Amino acid sequence: MILYKVIPNNYVNELFYYFTGLLTATSATLILLFFKFKTSMHLLGMGSILTFMIALSIHFEINITIAISLFTLFTGMVATSRLYLKAHTKNELLIGFLLGCCSQLIILKYWL
């Protein structure tokens, strides 16, 4: 409903592919959970949106380096907080971040 009422029609395709990549990464996390491997969903989301913002910058040929650098900083802050709270190990954080980034990179070839 939000896509049709709030966001203009010319941005709907990009958001569709973003959420498709996010759903792919979440499904991969569920499969890993069946094998008793926990991944960081926080870093999955941060890696996914960071890669999506880089792809949007390339696709629309706009300079959003400040936003990309802020999200890189926020990703580091989230990773640090997860380590500080001892909620995850370094491997779980790395796998979560890579799943988020790789899912967007796989979907990227369909809309870029």
Image: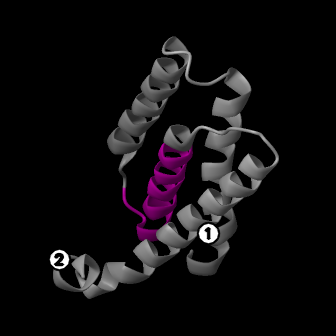
> Is residue 67 shown in magenta?
no
Q: Quadrant of residue 102?
A: bottom right
Helix, strand or loop at label 1? It is helix
In the image, what residue type sits under mark 2? Val
- Magenta extent: 44-62
x, y (%) of residue 83?
A: 55, 17
**Picture layout, residue 89 above or below residue 92:** above
In the image, what residue type sits under mark 1? Leu
Residue found at the very far right of the displayed protein: 35
Q: Badge 1 local density, few (<14 within 10 Å), some, or many (20+)?
A: some
Q: Which residue is mark 2?
A: 6
**Picture layout, residue 14 above or below residue 23:** below
**Picture layout, residue 3 above or below residue 104:** below
Q: Which residue is mark 1?
A: 108
Helix, strand or loop at label 2? It is loop
x, y (%) of residue 2?
A: 23, 77
First in sequence: mark 1 vs mark 2: 2
